[in-house]
Image: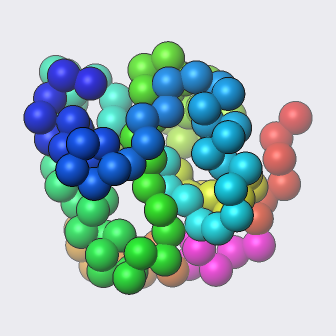
């Protein structure tokens, strides 16, 4: 995590930085709605920095209905593969440990306002085998 906008998420907002499968499992074992932020490569993807600013604003807009965590490089690729949300940056939504859906790449604000409630209201998707 080399960029100040990513560091801000963990230092200023107190979001966990998940760097291992065990840390991910522990985080998702908690009840409630979660959003995992997969930043991708900050040096190659300029949208990552936009996403790092947008997600805290979305969390506030939705009155902290979901908590947030930053996904580290060590578990990013397996998580993207497991959820089939392959492009970054991406926001992955969970109800406990059940994947609900994801939003990849930067979108218009109105798109987030329409899609996030749809995702959060879904019955959790079955686990992929």
Locate residue 27 relative to residue 115 in the image: left or right.
right
Q: At 59% across and 66% down in the image, what residue appears?
A: 33
Q: Is residue 18 visible?
A: yes
Q: Is residue 21 above or below residue 58?
A: above
- In the rendered image, residue 52, in percent from the top left (x then y), is placed at 23, 48
Rendering quarter of residue 70: top left
- In the rendered image, residue 59, in percent from the top left (x then y), is placed at 35, 70
Locate residue 22 relative to residue 60 in the image: left or right.
right
Q: At 77% across and 73% down in the image, what residue appears?
A: 123
Q: At 28% across and 54% down in the image, what residue appears?
A: 13
Q: Is residue 61 above or below residue 77?
A: below
Most foreground residue, 62 or 84:
62
- In the rendered image, residue 121, in percent from the top left (x then y), is placed at 64, 80
- In the rendered image, residue 129, in percent from the top left (x then y), is placed at 87, 35
Q: At 82% across and 41% down in the image, what residue appears?
A: 128
Q: Is residue 52 visible?
A: no
Report the residue that reaches farthest toward the right: 129
The range drawn in magenta is 118-123
Q: Quadrant of the N terminus?
A: top left
Most foreground residue, 123 or 85:
123
Locate residue 1 relative to residue 32 in the image: left or right.
left
Is-magenta flag for residue 27? no
């Amino acid at each position: 995590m080399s960029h100040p906008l990513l560091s801000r998420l963990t230092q200023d907002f107190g979001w966990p930085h998940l760097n291992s499968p065990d840390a991910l499992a522990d985080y998702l074992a908690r009840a409630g709605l979660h959003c995992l932020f997969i930043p991708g490569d900050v040096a190659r993807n300029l949208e990552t920095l936009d996403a790092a600013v947008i997600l805290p604003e979305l969390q506030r807009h939705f009155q902290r209905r979901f908590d947030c965590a930053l996904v580290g490089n060590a578990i990013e690729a397996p998580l993207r593969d497991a959820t089939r949300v392959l492009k970054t940056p991406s926001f992955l939504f969970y109800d406990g440990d059940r994947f609900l859906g994801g939003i990849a790449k930067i979108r218009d604000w109105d798109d987030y306002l329409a899609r996030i409630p749809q995702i959060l209201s879904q019955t959790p998707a079955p686990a992929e085998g």
